[in-house]
Amino acid sequence: MRTYDLTPFYRSTVGFDRLFSLLDRSTADGSPGYPPYNIERTGENSYRITVAVSGFSQGELSIVAKENTLTIKGEKTANENGKEGSEVLYRGIAARAFERVFQLADFVVVKNASLENGLLHVDLVREIPEAKKPRSIPISTSAPAQVVEGSAEKAAA
């Protein structure tokens, strides 16, 4: 059984709190660890998810971003042996279908995805709209009210 302490991620990232909470819950109930993946923070508002997808071609992978969910699927379609009539004596390279679902924080969008050396890299950026960004409000001072002689007498009359 594997146990992961995600506490350092809570302290060092902004925007993935829900994601790490879901990871905590998913590892507690024995969810499978295939394929392995990394989540990196590459900048103040940029992240990268790297999934080990050795043996999968670009056509056998799909990435779908819908609302606050990122789904990465892999499904083998070609002959696993690569040659007709060959027989696998030992299978140590996993080639089973998989689906990984990541919950994204608000305003996190997928910017790029690339496949190199058996690793699928998905780059994410948190783009906060101008209306949602904090803005500085200037504080003005008002001059004290001036009292005009006789104005109280005129108002009473």
Image (cartoon, rainbow, N blue to C red):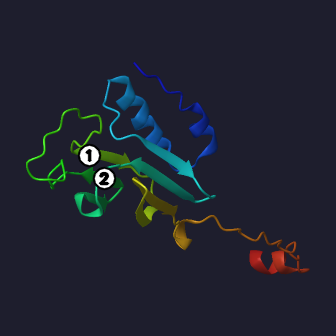
Asked if one can make out residue 76 in the rendered structure from this viewpoint, the answer is: yes
User: Where residue 40 sits: x, y (%)?
Assistant: 54, 49
**Residue placed at 31% from the left, 45% from the top?**
100
- Mark 1 neighbour density, 10 Å: few (under 14) some (14–19) many (20 or more): some
Determine whether the residue tagged by mark 1 lies in a helix, strand or loop: strand
Q: Nearer the viewer, residue 123 or 130?
A: 123
The quarter holding residue 7 reads top right
Q: Which mark is residue 72?
A: 2
State left or right for residue 63 relative to residue 75: right
Asked if one can make out residue 107 in the rendered structure from this viewpoint, the answer is: no
State left or right for residue 23 relative to residue 61: right
From this viewpoint, which residue is outermost toward the right?
A: 149
Identify residue type, mark 1.
Glu
State left or right for residue 97 relative to residue 105: left
**Residue placed at 15% from the left, 55% from the top?**
77
- Residue designated by label 1: 99
**From the viewer's perspective, is residue 73 above or below residue 28?**
below
User: Where residue 95 sits: x, y (%)?
Assistant: 24, 43
Q: Nearer the viewer, residue 28 or 17?
A: 28
Q: Which of the two discs, 2 and 1, labels the residue nearer the N terminus?
A: 2
From this viewpoint, which residue is outermost toward the front?
A: 86
**What whole-number distance in Å separates the C-alpha atoms at marks 2 and 1?**
6 Å
Which quadrant would the N terminus be assigned to in this image? top left
User: Where residue 8 sits: x, y (%)?
Assistant: 61, 35
**Residue placed at 87% from the left, 72% from the top?**
144
Identify residue type, mark 2.
Ile
**From the viewer's perspective, is residue 72 above or below residue 21?**
below
